[in-house]
Image (tube, rainbow, N blue to C red):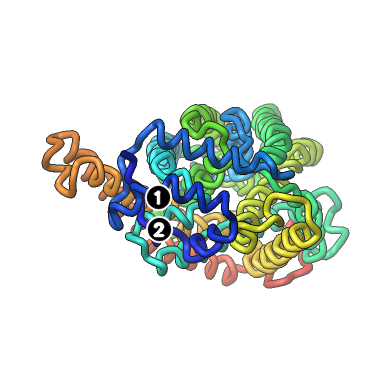
Amino acid sequence: MDTHEGDSDRSPDLNDKLERNQKLKELEEGQGQGRRLSHHHVTAIDSSSTSESVGRQIEMESENTIKYRTCSWQKTAALLFSEYICLAIMSFPWSYSVLGLVPGLILTIVIAAIVLYTSLIVWRFCLRHPEIRDVCDLGQYLFWDSKIAWWATAVMFLLNNTFIQGLHCVVGAEYLNTMSGGAVCTVVFSLIVAIVSFFFSLPRTFSALSRVATFSAFFTFISVLLATIFAGIEDHPAGYPEKGNPIVLAIPAKGTTFISGMSAFLNISYTFIGQITLPSFIAEMKEPRDFWKSVTAVTIAEVIVFSLVGSIVYAYTGTQYVTAPAFGSLSDEVYKKVSFSFMIPTIIFLGVLYASVSARFVFFRLFEGTRHKGNNTVVGWAAWAGILAVLWIMAWIIAEVIPFFSDLLSIMSSLFDSFFGFIFWGVAYIRMRAADHGPDFYKTRGLRGWCGFIFNVFLIFVGLFFLGPGTYASVMSVVQSYQSGTVGGVFTCASNAL
């Protein structure tokens, strides 16, 4: 028998809203027989019950106009490609310039391997609980039905996604300033990006967005490929010869501070860590068991693209002339503008993707068990648009308060990736193994048990390191940026062109 969590092991509003809809109630009864047996244990996985649960969810949507469980593993891979193959790739040359090429490449591979490992943990946990709709439901399951855990996860989830939206407002303003020579106030450019992104956020299913995701990932690849080629064929980087010939370091330069080194490490980590969206993607797959194909394909592509782009661009621009994003290192204005222009779909779409994830989190909890969730109603669409409008207004405000690229990446990485990249999944592994083999699994499973336990405890401590020293380094980097005058002020009209 498949033994799931207790009825109270859900988000605070899940049970009340399920009771509004008889079909959902029947599904709950079908899944819940075993759930009521244990109030504190994550269940062992059962293939037939998982498939049956997903099948029931698809069947329940059959009469709805808007259907959510429609993604194949290929469509999910497209969403992941658009999430990971993004503008943050162009921060890798800067990170390598701070860390040195050898440590930078090693960290790239190590972080990629850890993220793949933890992504598979997320996947396995979601297979045990097909009723999980997002990382907030998962967070409550992990921490023993704690309502505090659900709310804390929800706050971090929404803030993380909104910060990413804000980052894309910043980058969109950078692009418009670069192309126009600062023709309009930067605040206005940022607002234009937010408004355009709002309209692109309106589709309500990931299946619909996956088509745009493929387009976005392809153009991002073209953008970074062109930037890499241009860096190699031009005579010298932007700013040359003011600081001498470009210097490429195999190891960090003498005198590299903890703050700058940590910021560079967090930049690399941010680009890889995206597990926060995975439960939402898995919840809309027709066959969740195929998710491993999506995430494995994307991870392999990430390591190849990130390493090559980061090292090649750094090799040609050197420590003195590299910028973040690296488009600013190109001395030829035509090269810079052409390569940067291919990034437009990603500048818009990735913010759109995270806005959609946040909006459906709020929307589903407002309208679970009502006809507005799965059909085209005026109330449903008005609420959906209203939620998106609030999210994009908040993102625009964040973009104006922290209007610079690398430090905003570092802050997001330290505050949110600590939990969604490491801590959650170390806890998830321990809970699943305890459910399968008992609380002393690390003893009863021998060497394998001890190795798994020690490694996942290590992941939890890595997350705490991100949260503590990482946040300190990120905040101090922001303070230093303002003190040095290298960035504009809050809500500034000053151009942030590359």
Whether residue 95 is visible, yes or no, is no
**Placement of 452 over or under 415, stated as above or below:** above
First of labels 2, 1 by sequence position: 2
At x 66%, y 54%, the residue is 355
Q: Quadrant of the N terminus?
A: top left
Q: Is residue 467 left or right of residue 376?
A: left
Secondary structure of the residue carrying numbered label 2: loop
**Quarter residue 484 falls in:** bottom right
Task: Give coordinates of residue 301: x percent, y percent.
Answer: 54, 28
Q: Is residue 437 left or right of residue 215?
A: left
Q: Which residue is mark 1?
A: 32
Q: Which mark is residue 356?
A: none
Asked whether 131 or 354 is in front, the reply is: 131
Residue type beneath disc 1: Gly
Residue type beneath disc 2: Asp
Give the distance between the C-alpha atoms of the residues marked 2 and 1, in whole angstroms.
7 Å
At x 50%, y 32%, the residue is 291
Asked whether the beta carbons under mark 2 and mark 1 sit within 8 Å of each other, the answer is yes
At x 38%, y 53%, the residue is 424
Task: Give coordinates of residue 479: x percent, y percent.
Answer: 53, 70
Q: Which residue is mark 2?
A: 7
**Placement of 201 over or under 475, stated as above or below:** above
Whether residue 490 is visible, yes or no, is yes
Asked whether 37 or 154 is in front, the reply is: 37
